[in-house]
Amino acid sequence: MWPFRRRRREQPQPIGEAEAYERSYGDPSRDVRVIKLPPRRPRDKKVLESGETLRRAFLERLERRNRGGNDNSG
């Protein structure tokens, strides 16, 4: 016989997301309103292309700076 035998605890049943939220936060606040946003408009391909051109130019500029090709120190 063991002097300090531990009894196994019964595992509680898993709870759902709604019940977990209710336990954590309680009733929803009346200060916050949930709204539904309209669908996003389609993206303009010209804008995406010009953004990609800008990104490439920036990367080229960083490469030149890292190589030390354009030193403007004083």
Image: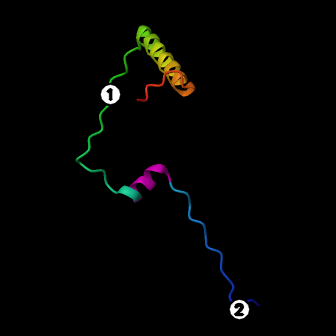
Crowding around mark 2 (Cα neighbors within 10 Å: few <14, some 14 to 19, many 20+) is: few
User: Residue 72, percent across and down?
Assistant: 43, 25
| Name of the residue lying farthest toward the left | 31
Q: Is 42 one of the magenta-colored residues?
A: no
Q: Is residue 31 left or right of residue 1?
A: left
- Write the start and end of the magenta stretch as one range: 16-23
Q: Is residue 45 left or right of residue 14?
A: left
Q: Which of 24/72 is in front?
A: 72
Mark 2 belongs to which amino acid? Pro
| Name of the residue lying farthest toward the right | 1
- Residue tagged by mark 1? 37
Dot 1 lies on which element? Answer: loop
Q: Is residue 72 left or right of residue 1?
A: left
Predominant secondary structure in magenta? Answer: helix
User: Residue 56, percent across and down?
Assistant: 51, 17
Tell me the quarter of the image containing the N terminus: bottom right
Mark 1 belongs to which amino acid? Leu
Q: Report the residue at 43% width, 50% height from top.
A: 18
Residue 3's label in the rendered image is: 2
Residue 18's label in the rendered image is: none
